[in-house]
Image: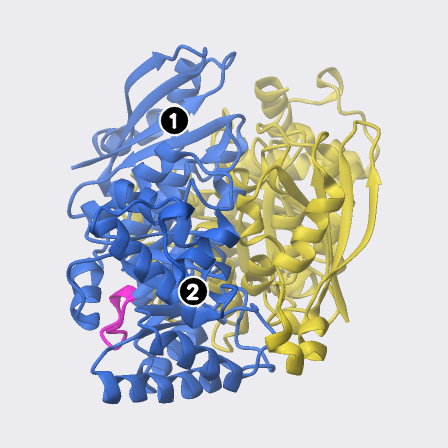
Chain colours: A yellow, B blue
Amino acid sequence: MTIEVDYRFPPGVDAEKQAKVIAVGQTAGTWDARFSHREEVLKSHLAEVVSGITQPDGSSLVTIRFPEANVENDIPSLLTMIFGKYSMAGAAKVMAVRLPEHYGRRPKVGITGIRERLGVRDRPLIMAIFKPALGLSADDHGAILQEVAGAGLDIIKDDEILGDLEVAPTLKRLEACRQVLDQVKQQTGRTVLYAVNVTGAADKLIEKARLLVREGANALLLNVLTYGYSVLDSLAADPEINVPIFAHPALAGALCASPDYGMAYSVVLGTLMAYCGADAVLYPAHYGSLPFDAQEERRIRDSLRSRHVFPVPSAGIHPGIVPKALADYGQDVILNAGTGIMDHPDGPAMGVKAFFEALERVKSGEPFNLEAVPEGALRQALKKWM
Amino acid sequence: MTIEVDYRFPPGVDAEKQAKVIAVGQTAGTWDARFSHREEVLKSHLAEVVSGITQPDGSSLVTIRFPEANVENDIPSLLTMIFGKYSMAGAAKVMAVRLPEHYGRRPKVGITGIRERLGVRDRPLIMAIFKPALGLSADDHGAILQEVAGAGLDIIKDDEILGDLEVAPTLKRLEACRQVLDQVKQQTGRTVLYAVNVTGAADKLIEKARLLVREGANALLLNVLTYGYSVLDSLAADPEINVPIFAHPALAGALCASPDYGMAYSVVLGTLMAYCGADAVLYPAHYGSLPFDAQEERRIRDSLRSRHVFPVPSAGIHPGIVPKALADYGQDVILNAGTGIMDHPDGPAMGVKAFFEALERVKSGEPFNLEAVPEGALRQALKKWM
């Protein structure tokens, strides 16, 4: 089996030459007569330039095929091979990575498992983020959760910048929130997931994740790119971590936002996350508050779903985008709103209700323009955000 | 204590507005009257825009000061805060990060420790890389090491793309090479360091590193950016890993090469490595085979040295660059050559000897032009590479 990578070179670059530099320089390299006894094996590790086309804008798209025997069936060794040293060689961007079906890791929980845990099979899931992002106490978190969980929320997560800080230590947040989750379960039978942000040096982070799960955490949040794909890999492989892992895209722009350098968002947040064991992946939605390309968003969605990973379009999500989101995603999507729930004019509970009103309205085919929407949570949201 | 970050915005960006977006959006965020009871604490977590200047090219350089209480005294949480979500917001590049002296981690071994282990106090160290990069057997590695160690080499490392592969499993490479290292020690009293590439999912990687050290590894190589700064942090903190950690820059270009996005090389390979426990850091030299800015190289050198981390200019290093390297670096530098040693016309041992001849020649003030250099290893190298 082989690994195929598409590289884009901007106009003016000798793509044919660069493709050969990659195929040789990122694999066995060159050798002379002293290594003739290893000739066969050395050759078997070389990559191969499969195709190259010049695109209408003058840029080149080159496909290179790498032997799977060069890597360790994981994302870090893959990255080192396909773009390690070469990333420093000049303008080039990794546009797509195609991996063998069996490569890497699959989610332990994934779309089906998250739906089963929540007992929600037939609609998009609604997810909120604790806001303000940091500065609240653990008890504040509990109080906020009480409001939104009571209103029917499916999932809540820490803000990605809230680590294990003195102001609200991770275990204390979990403790405060778990009481609320237990209460909701007892009173309504509903499960609400709380994705706790897990942080720390790699070995400590993994220990902390196990501890959190033992203490009742039913989901985890990981900033995969600032901690490392190898950390996601470890968490996903760990039998004690039997809860869904939500992958956050923090830092992705540093790798992906440049047109001529780095890697495409659909590679970093789509393919690589999907082959590294994430259960759900957050990324910017093109109708959100961050500039994002609709086509890249579709590619991410499709990469994730092809491995049964939940797509979580995020950033600037509010009830007003529900019709668009349903048109783009159908049912298998988690709509993740921060201020779009927490800053609802009538409070976070109404923020949650506005999302469910929006889902119902689209489902029953009712018009979505402000004039047609009756007084209530959704109307208030549309007035604020549309 | 505070953390200061310089962001560069290209011409045309409203830098004042973006600076405020960062200062608020990457910290506490906004809040309303419901959180008036937490007003004081929330405010204490906000960042502050310290200064902003427009540069001659129309770009803006803005300095933002973040509270240290927002992060966990490590690099991953720092990255999430300073550039996590914002990296996806538009064109902006992190140009410098200034951390409190006590922040993060210091090297366990560092410049002094590496010199002590080698017993070499007064000259640059010479380092080689096993080539071809992958496809050799463990025994081939041993045979190559025999040649170069016998010629006086100080340090050798695996190529960064050589992981724990069937063709030459990591432990087998170590076993083959350790026999040579032991022999050299017995026969000459000299220590030669072999930086073994340590790979795998985070928890397995750390276990493997401990195993390698128990089995006699006297140095480790880590692809910090493909595995994660959190993995370096763990290795550096681990009392069992009492050997120097060489940090490889693989993938740095994906983060750093774009002029308008990502982070400066001097941040990623300088500051962040130096505060994360690396003992020596590899990066491209401006007179090497990769395009690299001399000023960025100086910044990396100075960041590393300020924390007693060994700078290791790399990529396209050969004996001909020794005069330049000595002028730029003086004695506290590791000159790291791959093909510049392994592909010497008269073999790798002569490649090593050529470096020592070059060091001697510069030391004694003898001219370095080809006409002046007598027959021998150095002359052959200059003929090939200059």
Query: Same chain, marks 2 and 1?
Result: yes
Determine the secondary structure under disc 1: strand
- Lateral position of residue A342 relative to residue B297, left or right: right
On the rendered image, what quadrant is the N terminus of chain A found in? bottom right
Relative vertical location of residue B13 with respect to residue A161 in this rendering, above or below: above
Quarter of the figure with residue B168: bottom right
- Lateral position of residue A201 relative to residue B345, left or right: left
Q: For mark 1, does the 10 Å Cα neighbourhood hold few (<14), some (14 to 19), or many (20 or more) residues?
A: many
Relative vertical location of residue B150 with respect to residue A377 in this rendering, above or below: below
**x, y (%) of residue B223?**
45, 60
- Label 1 sits on residue: B7
**x, y (%) of residue B128?**
41, 65
Q: Is residue A75 visible?
A: yes
Looking at the rendered image, the disc whose residue lies closer to the viewer, 2 or 1, is 2
Characterize the magenta stretch by its predominant secondary structure.
Answer: loop
Q: CA distance from mark 2 to mark 1?
A: 43 Å
Q: Residue at x 48, y 49 (%)?
A: A157
Q: Which mark is residue B351?
A: 2
Of the image marks 2 and 1, the number of the one nearer the N terminus: 1
Q: Chain of mark 2?
A: B
**x, y (%) of residue A311?**
66, 49
**x, y (%) of residue B177?**
41, 83
Closest to the observer: B78 or B247?
Answer: B247
Q: Is residue B277 magenta?
A: no
The amino acid type, in three-letter code, at marker 1 is Tyr
Q: Is residue B242 magenta?
A: yes
Quarter of the figure with residue A130: top left
Magenta residue span: B236-244
On the rendered image, what quadrant is the C terminus of chain A found in? top right
Determine the secondary structure under disc 2: helix
